[in-house]
Amino acid sequence: MSDFTFLYRGRDTNASPEQMQKTMEKWRAWFKQLGEKGHLKDIGHPLENTGKVVKGKQKSVTDGPFAEAKDVVGGFTLIQARDLEHAVELSKGCPILEVGGSVEVRPIQVLNM
Amino acid sequence: MVAVLTRLFGVHNLALAEDVVQDAFCRALEVWSFRGVPENPAAWLMAAAKNRALDVLRRERTARTYEPELTRFLQSEWTLAPIVEEMFTDKAIKDDQLRMMFSCCHPRLPEEAQVMLILHILCGFGIDEVASAFVTTYTAVEKRIPRAKKVLAGSERLFDTQAPSDFSTRLPAVQGALYLLFNEGYHGASAEFAVRAELCQEAMRLAALLLDHPLGATSVTYALSALMCLNKARLPARLNASGKLNSLFDQDRSLWDQKLVSEGLQLLDLSAKGSELSEYHLEAAIAAVHATAQSVQATNWKEIVSLYDTLMSLRPNPIVALNRAIAVGQRDGAERGLTELRAITDAERLGKYPFYQAALGEFELRGGRPQVAREHFTAALALSRNATERQFFGQRIEACDHGV
């Protein structure tokens, strides 16, 4: 088993409370399913759309990230899967795909130093 | 509320659940004293408790462990709010109360402690109210409840009401606790009438929860509910407006709650579906004979005696024996009643029970010996446990003096 991160992009944050509730139910069902099969290492959190970006040696602080809404990371989860293919397979159940978002599946790099 | 929050936090965090509820009430006092009481105070309190629970869960996300199966979901913002929201729906609240009821009936707790816990956690009775319901001191309850809570918190998780075998194993204990709760209200020695009717009401509410559950709705539970309805129906006549106790013989039967009577009879019908015959069945059947009789004279005492006979074989105890003897006296006359009363084998256990002396007095009086009767009523008076009983026996003594 290896660890992977799911990065979610394109979360609809303008939904009405009602829609929001429906969506959250789908997310919960999905998480529950992943958890029952032992794939959920850390459920992670959703993220606010904006924050601050700290950059460079000067540690300059700017508002951000200023990307297209669909490109902003909206949350993350830590997943356990056999391999990348398996992780990709698991990501296909994510409700964000139904609303035009994306899941970026990234293996966690094991640093051998 | 405590039941719901305990489900969220896990039974080992019972104290935390109570703190949150306490907080919600304090907040209510603050806000309401400024802005006035909201239109729906109960909903307001629930919302306050819900928000407070969210606060606590966020702040102590990693500091505590919660209900095992929920912990993971409570730790993430993905799922935290939706789960808490779901917990506060009506259905979930009912489930949690049932779960808590079964958890309170922990096998390591004595029956009385179980009922105290139910009263305290599920019925929201304060320590002083529990103490007055059990006719004991504040300090005694103040010691017992935390001890019982520790036992409860020591169990790893709340009772799982979905597990059929566990459910059936603990069901009799729960039924027993509810029966005790009801009787405490109905026959209890407490002087406070208001508290007593409330006890009956709470027992009936919790029994209804039990009936709502597919595994809880057994023929025995139906019998228990029937028994409660049929007895509760007579409560308005049992005590009159000035708080005076009326025996079954002097009750104004028009005061009996006919709606509860028919509800009770319906429940009794439902209870007959199983093959099981419990003591609740018999007591309910006896109550039904009384509830449907037009008058004391028109009561089918033969039927009642035979029901008491069966009850005696199922659960022999002096109180049942006493009631049986009274029924025999009604069927065959005062002299036979006296013989039966004196024949009760462990009558000494009734030594402190004022109604044994009262029953002897009643039959002596009917047998035309007011002097002997007076002695018995005087003994009963000396044993009486509250003002209502004292007044009742005092009147019986007067009746002897006036040769009524």
Image (spheres, coloured by chain):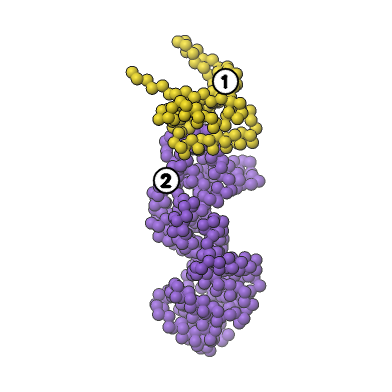
Image height check: is B97 above or below B352? above
Amino acid type at image mark 1: Asp
Can residue B63 be seen here? The reply is yes
Q: Secondary structure at mark 1?
A: helix
Q: Label 1 marks which chain's residue?
A: A
Label 2 crowding class (10 Å Cα cut-off): few <14, some 14-19, many 20+? many
Q: Give the residue at x 45% y 56%.
A: B165
**Outermost residue, bottom direction?**
B368
Mark in front: 1 vs 2:
1
Can residue B209 be seen here? The reply is no
Label 1 crowding class (10 Å Cα cut-off): few <14, some 14-19, many 20+? some
- Name the quadrant containing residue B353: bottom left
Expressed as whole percent of the image width and height from the top left, the position of residue B132 reads: 48, 61
Q: Label 2 marks which chain's residue?
A: B
Q: Of B322 and B168, which appears nearest the observer?
A: B168
Amino acid type at image mark 2: His
Quadrant of image for the N terminus of chain A: top left
Residue B276 badge: none
Is residue B384 toward the left or the right of residue A111 in the image? right
Provide the residue designation for mark 1.
A71
Q: Give the residue at x 40% y 57%.
A: B107
Chain B: its colour in the image is purple
Q: Secondary structure at mark 2?
A: helix
- Name the quadrant containing residue B241: bottom right
Q: Of B75 and B388, which appears nearest the observer?
A: B75
Chain A: its colour in the image is yellow
Provide the residue designation for mark 2.
B12
Please tell me how many numbered marks the rendered image carries. 2
Expressed as whole percent of the image width and height from the top left, the position of residue B336 reads: 49, 87
Is residue B269 toward the left or the right of residue B117 in the image? right
